[in-house]
Image (tube, rainbow, N blue to C red):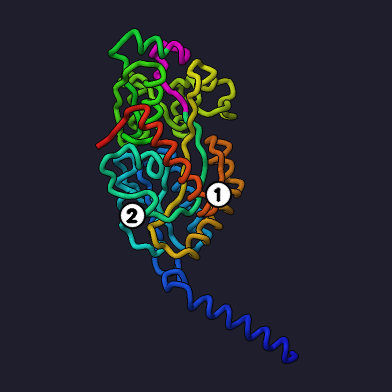
Amino acid sequence: MNTQRRSALAALLASAVLGTLAMPASAADWPAQKPISYVVPFTVGGSTDVVGRVLAQKLGDRLHQNVIVENKPGAAGGIGATYVAKAPPDGYTLFGGTISTHAINASLYKNLKYDPVKDFEPVSLIAYLPNVLLVDPNLGVNSVADLIALLKRDPNKRTFASSGAGTSTHLAGELFSSMIGVPLTHVPYKGTPPAMVDVSSGAVTFMFDQMTAALPLLQTGKLKLLAVTTKDRISLAPEVPTMQEAGVPGFQMASWQAVYAPKGTPKPILDKLAAEIALILKEPDVQEKLGKTMGMELVGSTPDELRALMATEIPRWAEVVKKSGATVE
């Protein structure tokens, strides 16, 4: 080896060593120290939980470290978000964030105990999820127009469920109420499954929620699907009209799922996680389960791309909250 090559190799090795030394200790040996906690701020069985469990298993395989899902439901994801916001920023706590926890709650809650921007590091946008309008098949309505007529005719039926106060499903109901000019009573639940059970039994008149969570009850005939809230019809139910097609002009919304870490988590860890998640979302079995079967539009973004999404979504939903008049203590 000549002198020039030896010098170049020495410089390369020195650069690699200095780069490692410059890394925070938690980033240099991450994730060898201990299992990673993936906090889901909603109950078991909902779409956020499903996404979390798929990612936890796949990340565990790729990082050679256990990733353990912890469900901490309540306050539209606020309980779990507050917990993660206070966790050590060492890469061992991740958060399954949503449009609720990191966009809607900022303007809906008067006394939010965390700041979605200042308390978190964006990691990756996971997916967009279509929302749908659901009713009990025995309610006697076959269209959105039928439901609106029922709500106007019978004050006792003016109730809608959601997976929690402040969630996108709550805001969808409030937006629907304001757009059709009918005051509705919101019935919040601690997660999607119990809310859907009460809608399917007729205890609550209707609800908006993700198509992903509704599929089991739709397939067994315990819920009826009246419309989708996205701009276009969806592949899982191409025969079902959009809300705009069904007679509510301007009604359009879609939920999203993302991964976050506590503020101050080292950038090398964030970048590593984002890169691994992007690869995971391209795996055929993940595409099948979350994409084809559950109807999610999988993304896998960089931290900066997720940060940019929040910069547009937070003010957008602040305007929706203002127009609807919705508020939560």
Q: Can you identify the residue that label 2 sits on?
A: 85
At horizontal 31% and vertical 34% (from top left) the residue drawn is 165
At horizontal 54% and vertical 80% (from top left) the residue drawn is 17
| Quadrant in the rendering for residue 317 | top left
Mark 1 lies on a secondary structure that is: loop
Query: In front: mark 1 or mark 2?
Result: 2
Outermost residue to the right: 2
Q: Mark 1 and mark 2: span between their CA atoms?
A: 22 Å
In the foreground, 168 or 94: 168
Mark 2 lies on a secondary structure that is: helix
In the foreground, 249 or 283: 249
Location of the C terminus by quadrant is top left
> Which amino acid does the dot numbered 2 rest on?
Ala
Earlier residue among tags 1 and 2: 2
User: Against 101, is 180 above or below?
Assistant: above
> Which contiguous range is marked in magenta?
132-146
At horizontal 58% and vertical 41% (from top left) the residue drawn is 288
User: Against 201, is 49 above or below?
Assistant: below
Q: Can you identify the residue that label 1 sits on?
A: 300
